Amino acid sequence: MSRLTRREMLGHAARGAALVGMGGVTAYLTVKAHDTYAWEIDPNKCINSQLGALGVEICDACATDCVLPLSAVRAVNHYPECGRCYICPAYFEIKSAVGPDGLPSEKLCPRDAIERKAIGWIDPDDPANNFYEYVIDESLCNGCGRCVMACKEPAGLGSIRLEVRHDVCLDCNRCSISTACPEDAYERREPAA
Amino acid sequence: MRRAIHVSLVVALLLAFGLSAAAQDPADYQRPVDVAPTDEVIGEGYVTPEVQRPRSLAPWRQVLDMALLGGALLLAAWIVLKRRSRRLAFALTVVCLAYFGFYREGCICPIGSIQNVAVALADPNHAVPYFVIGIFMLPLLAALFFGRVFCGGVCALGAIQELVLLKPIQVPPRLDRALGSLKWLYLVAAVALAVLPAAGRDFIICRFDPFVGFFRFTGPVHMMLIGGAFLLLGLFVGRPYCRYLCPYGALLSLTSRLSWRGVSITPDRELDCGLCNKACPYGAIEEMRAVRTSCLACARCYESCPVHLSCRGADAEAAS
Protein backbone atom coordinates (compact mmCIF):
# COMPACT_ATOMS: atom_id res chain seq x y z
CA MET A 1 0.00 0.00 0.00
CA SER A 2 1.36 3.32 -1.05
CA ARG A 3 1.80 6.10 1.45
CA LEU A 4 -0.93 8.68 1.59
CA THR A 5 -0.11 12.15 0.49
CA ARG A 6 -1.04 15.03 2.72
CA ARG A 7 -3.77 15.97 0.30
CA GLU A 8 -5.32 12.50 0.32
CA MET A 9 -5.10 12.40 4.07
CA LEU A 10 -6.95 15.72 4.41
CA GLY A 11 -9.51 14.44 1.94
CA HIS A 12 -10.13 11.30 4.00
CA ALA A 13 -10.38 13.32 7.17
CA ALA A 14 -12.88 15.75 5.67
CA ARG A 15 -14.94 12.91 4.25
CA GLY A 16 -14.87 11.14 7.58
CA ALA A 17 -16.01 14.30 9.33
CA ALA A 18 -18.83 14.76 6.82
CA LEU A 19 -19.88 11.13 7.32
CA VAL A 20 -19.93 11.57 11.07
CA GLY A 21 -22.00 14.72 10.70
CA MET A 22 -24.48 13.11 8.34
CA GLY A 23 -24.63 10.07 10.58
CA GLY A 24 -25.42 12.28 13.54
CA VAL A 25 -28.24 14.06 11.71
CA THR A 26 -29.60 10.72 10.52
CA ALA A 27 -29.47 9.27 14.02
CA TYR A 28 -31.23 12.28 15.51
CA LEU A 29 -33.97 12.16 12.87
CA THR A 30 -34.32 8.40 13.18
CA VAL A 31 -34.87 8.59 16.93
CA LYS A 32 -37.61 11.14 16.32
CA ALA A 33 -39.08 9.30 13.34
CA HIS A 34 -40.12 6.47 15.60
CA ASP A 35 -43.69 7.84 15.72
CA THR A 36 -46.15 6.96 13.00
CA TYR A 37 -48.19 10.11 13.17
CA ALA A 38 -50.48 10.90 10.30
CA TRP A 39 -53.05 13.56 9.49
CA GLU A 40 -56.47 12.76 10.90
CA ILE A 41 -59.73 14.70 10.97
CA ASP A 42 -61.51 15.12 14.29
CA PRO A 43 -65.20 14.63 13.36
CA ASN A 44 -66.29 16.58 16.43
CA LYS A 45 -64.37 19.60 15.21
CA CYS A 46 -65.08 19.38 11.47
CA ILE A 47 -67.82 21.93 10.77
CA ASN A 48 -69.54 19.50 8.39
CA SER A 49 -69.99 16.75 10.94
CA GLN A 50 -69.85 18.71 14.21
CA LEU A 51 -73.17 18.44 16.00
CA GLY A 52 -74.93 21.68 16.82
CA ALA A 53 -73.33 23.54 13.92
CA LEU A 54 -76.50 24.06 11.95
CA GLY A 55 -77.35 26.48 9.20
CA VAL A 56 -73.70 27.07 8.44
CA GLU A 57 -72.18 27.01 4.99
CA ILE A 58 -70.71 23.76 3.84
CA CYS A 59 -66.95 23.80 4.14
CA ASP A 60 -65.33 22.15 1.14
CA ALA A 61 -61.73 22.98 2.02
CA CYS A 62 -60.88 19.26 2.05
CA ALA A 63 -61.90 18.99 -1.60
CA THR A 64 -60.37 22.22 -2.83
CA ASP A 65 -57.18 22.58 -0.82
CA CYS A 66 -55.47 19.19 -1.02
CA VAL A 67 -52.35 19.22 -3.17
CA LEU A 68 -53.45 15.99 -4.82
CA PRO A 69 -55.66 16.09 -7.92
CA LEU A 70 -58.25 14.00 -6.10
CA SER A 71 -58.23 15.01 -2.46
CA ALA A 72 -56.76 12.61 0.09
CA VAL A 73 -59.94 13.16 2.09
CA ARG A 74 -63.08 11.25 1.34
CA ALA A 75 -66.46 10.74 2.96
CA VAL A 76 -67.07 7.43 4.69
CA ASN A 77 -70.48 6.06 5.54
CA HIS A 78 -70.32 4.22 8.84
CA TYR A 79 -72.88 1.59 7.92
CA PRO A 80 -73.78 0.42 11.44
CA GLU A 81 -74.89 3.99 12.21
CA CYS A 82 -76.67 4.60 8.90
CA GLY A 83 -80.46 4.98 9.07
CA ARG A 84 -80.80 3.51 5.56
CA CYS A 85 -83.53 6.05 4.92
CA TYR A 86 -85.91 5.93 1.95
CA ILE A 87 -85.19 9.58 1.25
CA CYS A 88 -81.63 10.04 2.35
CA PRO A 89 -80.82 13.75 2.72
CA ALA A 90 -77.21 13.03 1.83
CA TYR A 91 -78.19 11.23 -1.37
CA PHE A 92 -81.04 13.43 -2.57
CA GLU A 93 -81.08 17.16 -2.91
CA ILE A 94 -84.21 17.39 -0.76
CA LYS A 95 -84.84 20.96 -1.85
CA SER A 96 -85.23 19.88 -5.46
CA ALA A 97 -88.61 19.31 -7.07
CA VAL A 98 -90.28 15.99 -6.40
CA GLY A 99 -90.35 13.78 -9.45
CA PRO A 100 -93.16 11.46 -10.60
CA ASP A 101 -91.79 8.66 -8.41
CA GLY A 102 -92.26 10.78 -5.29
CA LEU A 103 -88.53 11.17 -4.82
CA PRO A 104 -86.54 14.39 -5.07
CA SER A 105 -85.41 14.76 -8.66
CA GLU A 106 -81.82 15.81 -7.97
CA LYS A 107 -78.93 14.23 -6.19
CA LEU A 108 -76.86 16.07 -3.64
CA CYS A 109 -73.44 14.69 -4.55
CA PRO A 110 -71.89 16.86 -7.28
CA ARG A 111 -69.76 13.93 -8.42
CA ASP A 112 -72.50 11.31 -8.23
CA ALA A 113 -70.33 9.21 -5.95
CA ILE A 114 -73.12 7.74 -3.83
CA GLU A 115 -74.95 4.63 -4.89
CA ARG A 116 -78.42 3.86 -3.54
CA LYS A 117 -79.41 0.22 -3.33
CA ALA A 118 -82.64 -1.19 -1.99
CA ILE A 119 -82.17 -3.89 0.60
CA GLY A 120 -84.25 -6.93 -0.16
CA TRP A 121 -87.65 -6.94 -1.87
CA ILE A 122 -89.46 -3.64 -2.40
CA ASP A 123 -93.23 -3.47 -2.09
CA PRO A 124 -94.20 -1.52 -5.25
CA ASP A 125 -97.15 0.03 -3.43
CA ASP A 126 -95.11 1.14 -0.46
CA PRO A 127 -91.46 1.66 -1.45
CA ALA A 128 -90.97 4.05 1.46
CA ASN A 129 -91.34 1.19 3.88
CA ASN A 130 -88.00 -0.24 3.00
CA PHE A 131 -84.35 0.13 3.86
CA TYR A 132 -81.79 1.42 1.44
CA GLU A 133 -78.05 1.02 1.51
CA TYR A 134 -75.87 3.99 0.57
CA VAL A 135 -72.36 3.23 -0.65
CA ILE A 136 -69.85 5.97 -1.40
CA ASP A 137 -67.52 5.28 -4.30
CA GLU A 138 -64.08 6.08 -2.94
CA SER A 139 -62.63 6.65 -6.39
CA LEU A 140 -65.16 9.41 -7.13
CA CYS A 141 -65.48 11.11 -3.74
CA ASN A 142 -63.34 14.21 -3.29
CA GLY A 143 -64.36 14.94 0.27
CA CYS A 144 -66.43 18.08 -0.40
CA GLY A 145 -68.48 17.34 2.70
CA ARG A 146 -71.96 18.03 1.33
CA CYS A 147 -73.29 14.60 2.25
CA VAL A 148 -71.59 14.83 5.65
CA MET A 149 -73.38 18.08 6.41
CA ALA A 150 -76.72 16.78 5.12
CA CYS A 151 -76.60 13.55 7.09
CA LYS A 152 -75.98 15.00 10.50
CA GLU A 153 -78.63 15.80 13.13
CA PRO A 154 -81.46 16.60 12.91
CA ALA A 155 -81.99 15.42 9.33
CA GLY A 156 -79.96 12.24 9.51
CA LEU A 157 -78.10 10.14 12.00
CA GLY A 158 -74.69 11.54 11.20
CA SER A 159 -73.24 8.31 9.90
CA ILE A 160 -71.11 9.98 7.21
CA ARG A 161 -67.79 11.52 8.18
CA LEU A 162 -64.77 12.87 6.39
CA GLU A 163 -61.64 10.77 6.74
CA VAL A 164 -58.10 10.89 5.40
CA ARG A 165 -57.00 8.12 3.06
CA HIS A 166 -53.61 7.39 4.53
CA ASP A 167 -52.56 5.38 1.50
CA VAL A 168 -52.69 8.40 -0.79
CA CYS A 169 -52.06 11.23 1.69
CA LEU A 170 -48.62 12.68 1.02
CA ASP A 171 -48.33 13.55 4.70
CA CYS A 172 -47.13 17.05 3.90
CA ASN A 173 -45.57 18.70 6.89
CA ARG A 174 -47.74 21.69 6.36
CA CYS A 175 -50.87 20.00 5.12
CA SER A 176 -52.60 22.58 2.97
CA ILE A 177 -56.04 21.39 4.07
CA SER A 178 -55.11 21.78 7.70
CA THR A 179 -53.97 25.31 6.93
CA ALA A 180 -57.30 26.04 5.27
CA CYS A 181 -59.45 24.23 7.86
CA PRO A 182 -61.51 26.85 9.72
CA GLU A 183 -62.04 24.62 12.74
CA ASP A 184 -58.55 23.23 13.38
CA ALA A 185 -60.03 19.78 12.89
CA TYR A 186 -56.78 18.48 11.41
CA GLU A 187 -54.41 16.87 13.80
CA ARG A 188 -51.34 14.79 13.49
CA ARG A 189 -51.89 11.76 15.57
CA GLU A 190 -51.72 8.01 15.60
CA PRO A 191 -54.31 6.81 13.06
CA ALA A 192 -57.23 4.93 14.55
CA ALA A 193 -56.88 1.19 14.06
CA MET B 1 -104.51 37.64 -28.84
CA ARG B 2 -104.14 39.66 -25.67
CA ARG B 3 -106.44 37.21 -23.94
CA ALA B 4 -104.24 34.29 -25.02
CA ILE B 5 -101.16 35.96 -23.53
CA HIS B 6 -103.05 36.63 -20.34
CA VAL B 7 -104.15 33.01 -19.99
CA SER B 8 -100.67 31.67 -20.67
CA LEU B 9 -99.23 34.04 -18.06
CA VAL B 10 -101.70 32.81 -15.46
CA VAL B 11 -100.89 29.22 -16.37
CA ALA B 12 -97.18 29.92 -16.08
CA LEU B 13 -97.69 31.57 -12.68
CA LEU B 14 -99.76 28.66 -11.46
CA LEU B 15 -97.13 26.22 -12.68
CA ALA B 16 -94.36 28.13 -10.95
CA PHE B 17 -96.39 28.20 -7.75
CA GLY B 18 -97.08 24.50 -7.96
CA LEU B 19 -93.42 23.71 -8.49
CA SER B 20 -92.29 25.84 -5.59
CA ALA B 21 -94.86 24.18 -3.36
CA ALA B 22 -93.53 20.81 -4.41
CA ALA B 23 -89.99 21.82 -3.50
CA GLN B 24 -89.54 21.12 0.17
CA ASP B 25 -87.94 23.51 2.53
CA PRO B 26 -85.03 21.78 4.29
CA ALA B 27 -86.55 22.78 7.62
CA ASP B 28 -89.64 20.73 6.72
CA TYR B 29 -87.64 17.62 6.16
CA GLN B 30 -88.46 15.02 8.74
CA ARG B 31 -85.91 12.44 9.65
CA PRO B 32 -87.54 9.13 8.82
CA VAL B 33 -85.75 7.09 11.48
CA ASP B 34 -84.42 7.77 14.93
CA VAL B 35 -82.02 4.90 15.25
CA ALA B 36 -80.01 2.99 12.75
CA PRO B 37 -81.75 -0.27 11.92
CA THR B 38 -79.87 -3.37 12.96
CA ASP B 39 -79.42 -6.43 10.79
CA GLU B 40 -82.37 -8.11 12.55
CA VAL B 41 -84.69 -5.17 11.92
CA ILE B 42 -83.73 -5.09 8.27
CA GLY B 43 -84.15 -8.85 8.09
CA GLU B 44 -83.92 -10.97 4.95
CA GLY B 45 -80.47 -12.12 5.98
CA TYR B 46 -79.00 -8.66 5.57
CA VAL B 47 -75.46 -8.23 6.77
CA THR B 48 -74.07 -4.76 7.44
CA PRO B 49 -71.14 -4.29 5.10
CA GLU B 50 -67.67 -3.43 6.33
CA VAL B 51 -66.98 0.26 6.74
CA GLN B 52 -64.41 1.46 4.23
CA ARG B 53 -61.14 1.83 6.06
CA PRO B 54 -58.13 3.62 4.74
CA ARG B 55 -55.70 1.17 3.29
CA SER B 56 -52.42 0.82 5.09
CA LEU B 57 -49.45 3.02 4.38
CA ALA B 58 -47.95 0.33 2.15
CA PRO B 59 -44.50 0.25 3.78
CA TRP B 60 -43.21 -2.21 1.18
CA ARG B 61 -43.60 0.50 -1.43
CA GLN B 62 -41.46 2.92 0.55
CA VAL B 63 -38.85 0.26 1.12
CA LEU B 64 -38.93 -0.50 -2.60
CA ASP B 65 -38.53 3.19 -3.47
CA MET B 66 -35.58 3.53 -1.14
CA ALA B 67 -33.95 0.37 -2.49
CA LEU B 68 -34.50 1.56 -6.06
CA LEU B 69 -33.01 4.95 -5.24
CA GLY B 70 -29.96 3.36 -3.63
CA GLY B 71 -29.59 0.88 -6.47
CA ALA B 72 -29.94 3.58 -9.10
CA LEU B 73 -27.27 5.69 -7.38
CA LEU B 74 -24.82 2.81 -7.31
CA LEU B 75 -25.64 1.93 -10.89
CA ALA B 76 -25.15 5.54 -11.96
CA ALA B 77 -21.79 5.61 -10.20
CA TRP B 78 -20.72 2.41 -11.93
CA ILE B 79 -21.92 3.55 -15.35
CA VAL B 80 -20.33 6.97 -15.19
CA LEU B 81 -17.14 6.32 -13.25
CA LYS B 82 -16.30 2.81 -14.38
CA ARG B 83 -18.00 2.12 -17.70
CA ARG B 84 -17.84 5.78 -18.71
CA SER B 85 -20.77 5.16 -21.01
CA ARG B 86 -22.95 8.04 -22.03
CA ARG B 87 -25.45 5.70 -23.62
CA LEU B 88 -26.03 3.70 -20.45
CA ALA B 89 -26.15 6.87 -18.36
CA PHE B 90 -28.83 8.23 -20.66
CA ALA B 91 -30.81 5.00 -20.48
CA LEU B 92 -30.67 5.08 -16.69
CA THR B 93 -31.86 8.69 -16.71
CA VAL B 94 -34.84 7.80 -18.87
CA VAL B 95 -35.77 4.84 -16.66
CA CYS B 96 -35.51 6.98 -13.52
CA LEU B 97 -37.59 9.72 -15.14
CA ALA B 98 -40.25 7.18 -15.96
CA TYR B 99 -40.30 5.68 -12.48
CA PHE B 100 -39.53 8.49 -10.02
CA GLY B 101 -41.03 11.17 -12.24
CA PHE B 102 -44.08 9.94 -14.07
CA TYR B 103 -44.95 6.78 -12.15
CA ARG B 104 -44.31 8.06 -8.61
CA GLU B 105 -45.41 11.53 -9.71
CA GLY B 106 -42.24 13.23 -8.56
CA CYS B 107 -42.94 12.71 -4.89
CA ILE B 108 -41.17 12.25 -2.65
CA CYS B 109 -37.92 13.65 -3.96
CA PRO B 110 -34.73 14.60 -2.11
CA ILE B 111 -35.03 18.20 -3.31
CA GLY B 112 -38.28 18.88 -1.54
CA SER B 113 -37.28 16.78 1.46
CA ILE B 114 -34.75 19.46 2.43
CA GLN B 115 -37.52 21.47 4.01
CA ASN B 116 -39.17 18.49 5.69
CA VAL B 117 -35.85 17.53 7.19
CA ALA B 118 -35.21 21.12 8.27
CA VAL B 119 -38.58 21.21 10.02
CA ALA B 120 -37.92 17.90 11.74
CA LEU B 121 -34.55 19.18 12.94
CA ALA B 122 -35.84 22.51 14.18
CA ASP B 123 -39.29 21.71 15.57
CA PRO B 124 -39.42 19.33 18.55
CA ASN B 125 -43.02 18.37 17.68
CA HIS B 126 -42.32 17.37 14.10
CA ALA B 127 -40.72 14.29 12.69
CA VAL B 128 -40.18 12.85 9.26
CA PRO B 129 -40.65 9.15 8.50
CA TYR B 130 -37.62 6.86 8.08
CA PHE B 131 -38.34 6.81 4.39
CA VAL B 132 -37.87 10.57 4.06
CA ILE B 133 -34.62 10.43 6.00
CA GLY B 134 -33.38 7.77 3.59
CA ILE B 135 -34.46 9.68 0.50
CA PHE B 136 -32.75 12.81 1.81
CA MET B 137 -29.51 11.15 2.89
CA LEU B 138 -28.82 8.58 0.16
CA PRO B 139 -27.90 11.02 -2.65
CA LEU B 140 -25.72 13.06 -0.27
CA LEU B 141 -23.94 9.89 0.79
CA ALA B 142 -23.47 8.92 -2.84
CA ALA B 143 -22.06 12.39 -3.55
CA LEU B 144 -19.58 11.96 -0.74
CA PHE B 145 -18.19 8.91 -2.49
CA PHE B 146 -18.87 9.30 -6.19
CA GLY B 147 -19.82 12.92 -6.86
CA ARG B 148 -23.15 14.15 -8.08
CA VAL B 149 -24.31 10.88 -9.61
CA PHE B 150 -27.80 11.60 -8.34
CA CYS B 151 -28.06 14.65 -10.62
CA GLY B 152 -26.78 12.87 -13.68
CA GLY B 153 -28.47 9.53 -13.41
CA VAL B 154 -31.37 9.47 -11.01
CA CYS B 155 -33.04 12.85 -10.47
CA ALA B 156 -36.33 13.10 -12.38
CA LEU B 157 -36.20 16.89 -12.49
CA GLY B 158 -32.75 16.72 -13.99
CA ALA B 159 -33.78 13.98 -16.41
CA ILE B 160 -36.64 15.94 -17.95
CA GLN B 161 -34.19 18.79 -18.64
CA GLU B 162 -31.58 16.34 -19.91
CA LEU B 163 -34.07 15.09 -22.49
CA VAL B 164 -34.80 18.52 -23.95
CA LEU B 165 -31.17 19.66 -24.16
CA LEU B 166 -30.77 19.63 -27.95
CA LYS B 167 -28.51 22.56 -28.82
CA PRO B 168 -26.32 23.25 -25.83
CA ILE B 169 -24.56 26.58 -25.71
CA GLN B 170 -21.77 27.51 -23.33
CA VAL B 171 -22.77 30.01 -20.70
CA PRO B 172 -19.96 32.54 -20.10
CA PRO B 173 -18.15 31.32 -16.96
CA ARG B 174 -18.62 34.55 -15.05
CA LEU B 175 -22.37 34.60 -15.69
CA ASP B 176 -22.51 30.90 -14.89
CA ARG B 177 -20.90 31.49 -11.51
CA ALA B 178 -23.13 34.45 -10.73
CA LEU B 179 -26.30 32.56 -11.58
CA GLY B 180 -24.99 29.52 -9.72
CA SER B 181 -25.01 31.44 -6.47
CA LEU B 182 -28.80 31.81 -6.76
CA LYS B 183 -29.25 28.22 -5.62
CA TRP B 184 -27.55 29.04 -2.34
CA LEU B 185 -29.95 31.90 -1.79
CA TYR B 186 -32.82 29.55 -2.59
CA LEU B 187 -31.48 26.97 -0.13
CA VAL B 188 -31.13 29.56 2.62
CA ALA B 189 -34.63 30.90 1.94
CA ALA B 190 -36.11 27.40 1.91
CA VAL B 191 -34.49 26.43 5.22
CA ALA B 192 -35.38 29.78 6.78
CA LEU B 193 -39.03 29.39 5.77
CA ALA B 194 -39.11 25.82 7.01
CA VAL B 195 -37.82 26.52 10.50
CA LEU B 196 -40.36 29.27 11.14
CA PRO B 197 -43.18 28.56 13.60
CA ALA B 198 -45.82 26.28 12.09
CA ALA B 199 -48.20 29.04 10.97
CA GLY B 200 -45.59 30.89 8.93
CA ARG B 201 -44.02 27.87 7.29
CA ASP B 202 -43.94 27.74 3.56
CA PHE B 203 -42.74 24.75 1.61
CA ILE B 204 -41.50 26.77 -1.32
CA ILE B 205 -39.39 24.09 -2.96
CA CYS B 206 -42.41 21.88 -3.61
CA ARG B 207 -44.74 24.79 -4.29
CA PHE B 208 -42.41 26.20 -6.92
CA ASP B 209 -41.24 22.90 -8.35
CA PRO B 210 -41.35 23.71 -12.07
CA PHE B 211 -41.61 20.17 -13.39
CA VAL B 212 -43.81 18.26 -10.97
CA GLY B 213 -46.84 19.54 -12.88
CA PHE B 214 -45.65 17.66 -15.96
CA PHE B 215 -45.18 14.47 -13.96
CA ARG B 216 -48.74 14.72 -12.67
CA PHE B 217 -50.23 16.11 -15.89
CA THR B 218 -51.85 18.80 -13.81
CA GLY B 219 -50.83 21.76 -11.73
CA PRO B 220 -51.27 25.48 -11.20
CA VAL B 221 -51.20 27.31 -14.53
CA HIS B 222 -48.41 29.67 -13.56
CA MET B 223 -46.19 26.75 -12.49
CA MET B 224 -46.86 24.90 -15.75
CA LEU B 225 -45.90 28.05 -17.64
CA ILE B 226 -42.73 28.48 -15.60
CA GLY B 227 -41.92 24.80 -16.14
CA GLY B 228 -42.49 25.22 -19.87
CA ALA B 229 -40.22 28.27 -19.87
CA PHE B 230 -37.51 26.27 -18.09
CA LEU B 231 -37.81 23.50 -20.66
CA LEU B 232 -37.63 25.99 -23.54
CA LEU B 233 -34.56 27.60 -22.02
CA GLY B 234 -33.25 24.09 -21.41
CA LEU B 235 -33.17 23.48 -25.17
CA PHE B 236 -30.05 25.65 -25.29
CA VAL B 237 -28.85 26.15 -21.74
CA GLY B 238 -28.05 22.83 -20.11
CA ARG B 239 -30.29 22.14 -17.12
CA PRO B 240 -31.00 25.68 -16.00
CA TYR B 241 -32.95 24.60 -12.90
CA CYS B 242 -30.27 22.19 -11.67
CA ARG B 243 -27.39 24.60 -12.13
CA TYR B 244 -28.89 27.85 -10.98
CA LEU B 245 -31.80 27.13 -8.67
CA CYS B 246 -31.84 23.61 -7.29
CA PRO B 247 -31.24 23.89 -3.53
CA TYR B 248 -30.40 20.21 -3.30
CA GLY B 249 -27.83 20.79 -6.03
CA ALA B 250 -26.26 23.30 -3.65
CA LEU B 251 -26.04 20.66 -0.91
CA LEU B 252 -24.69 18.10 -3.37
CA SER B 253 -22.03 20.44 -4.67
CA LEU B 254 -20.97 20.93 -1.07
CA THR B 255 -20.62 17.23 -0.32
CA SER B 256 -19.20 16.36 -3.74
CA ARG B 257 -16.35 18.75 -2.97
CA LEU B 258 -15.18 16.07 -0.55
CA SER B 259 -15.99 13.16 -2.83
CA TRP B 260 -13.75 10.14 -2.85
CA ARG B 261 -14.08 9.52 -6.57
CA GLY B 262 -15.66 11.54 -9.28
CA VAL B 263 -15.71 12.08 -13.00
CA SER B 264 -12.05 12.50 -13.87
CA ILE B 265 -10.76 13.39 -17.26
CA THR B 266 -7.29 12.03 -17.73
CA PRO B 267 -6.10 12.94 -21.20
CA ASP B 268 -2.76 11.76 -22.52
CA ARG B 269 -0.27 14.56 -22.63
CA GLU B 270 -0.27 14.47 -26.41
CA LEU B 271 -4.00 14.62 -26.62
CA ASP B 272 -5.07 17.68 -24.74
CA CYS B 273 -7.58 18.26 -27.49
CA GLY B 274 -10.22 19.90 -25.33
CA LEU B 275 -13.11 18.25 -27.13
CA CYS B 276 -14.54 17.27 -23.77
CA ASN B 277 -14.41 20.91 -22.78
CA LYS B 278 -16.72 21.78 -25.65
CA ALA B 279 -18.91 18.78 -25.03
CA CYS B 280 -19.78 19.72 -21.48
CA PRO B 281 -23.04 21.68 -21.53
CA TYR B 282 -22.77 22.49 -17.84
CA GLY B 283 -19.53 24.43 -17.80
CA ALA B 284 -18.12 21.84 -15.45
CA ILE B 285 -14.78 21.33 -17.20
CA GLU B 286 -12.11 23.86 -16.46
CA GLU B 287 -8.68 23.48 -18.02
CA MET B 288 -9.60 20.00 -19.13
CA ARG B 289 -10.38 18.77 -15.66
CA ALA B 290 -13.86 18.07 -14.37
CA VAL B 291 -14.91 20.34 -11.56
CA ARG B 292 -16.54 18.03 -9.07
CA THR B 293 -18.82 20.57 -7.50
CA SER B 294 -20.55 21.40 -10.78
CA CYS B 295 -20.12 18.13 -12.70
CA LEU B 296 -23.51 16.48 -13.07
CA ALA B 297 -22.06 13.09 -14.05
CA CYS B 298 -23.75 12.90 -17.45
CA ALA B 299 -20.72 11.27 -19.16
CA ARG B 300 -20.94 13.50 -22.24
CA CYS B 301 -17.23 14.25 -21.97
CA TYR B 302 -16.31 10.57 -22.27
CA GLU B 303 -18.55 10.21 -25.29
CA SER B 304 -16.78 13.07 -27.02
CA CYS B 305 -13.30 11.77 -26.28
CA PRO B 306 -11.52 10.44 -29.38
CA VAL B 307 -9.33 8.20 -27.25
CA HIS B 308 -12.24 7.14 -25.12
CA LEU B 309 -10.97 3.63 -24.68
CA SER B 310 -7.51 4.62 -23.63
CA CYS B 311 -9.02 7.19 -21.34
CA ARG B 312 -10.82 4.54 -19.50
CA GLY B 313 -10.34 2.58 -16.36
CA ALA B 314 -7.84 2.35 -13.59
CA ASP B 315 -4.62 2.79 -15.61
CA ALA B 316 -5.71 6.19 -16.75
CA GLU B 317 -6.50 7.07 -13.19
CA ALA B 318 -3.11 5.88 -12.04
CA ALA B 319 -1.36 7.75 -14.82
CA SER B 320 -2.74 11.03 -13.61
Image (spheres, rainbow, N blue to C red):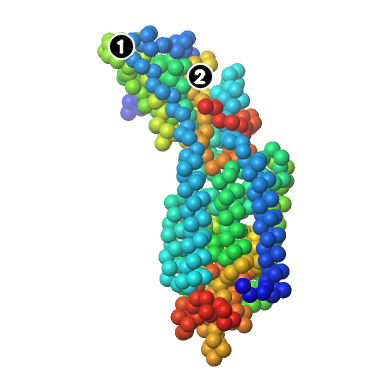
Q: Amino acid at mark 2?
A: Gly
Vertical placement of B97 versus B219: above or below?
below
Residue drawn at point x = 61 percent, y = 25 percent: A45
Find residue B238 and report its horizontal and vertical position in percent: 54, 71
Residue highlighted by disc 2 = A158
Secondary element under disc 2, as helix, strand or loop, is loop
Residue highlighted by disc 1 = B44
Secondary element under disc 1, as helix, strand or loop, is loop
Q: Residues within 10 Å of mark 2 (few under 14, many from 20)?
A: many
Residue drawn at point x = 54 percent, y = 84 percent: B267
Q: Chain of mark 2?
A: A
Find residue B81 and report its horizontal and vertical position in percent: 52, 70
Find residue B260 and report its horizontal and vertical position in percent: 61, 67
Find residue B170 and report its horizontal and vertical position in percent: 57, 78
Alpha carbons under labels 1 and 2: distance apart: 25 Å
Quadrant the N terminus of chain A occupies: bottom right
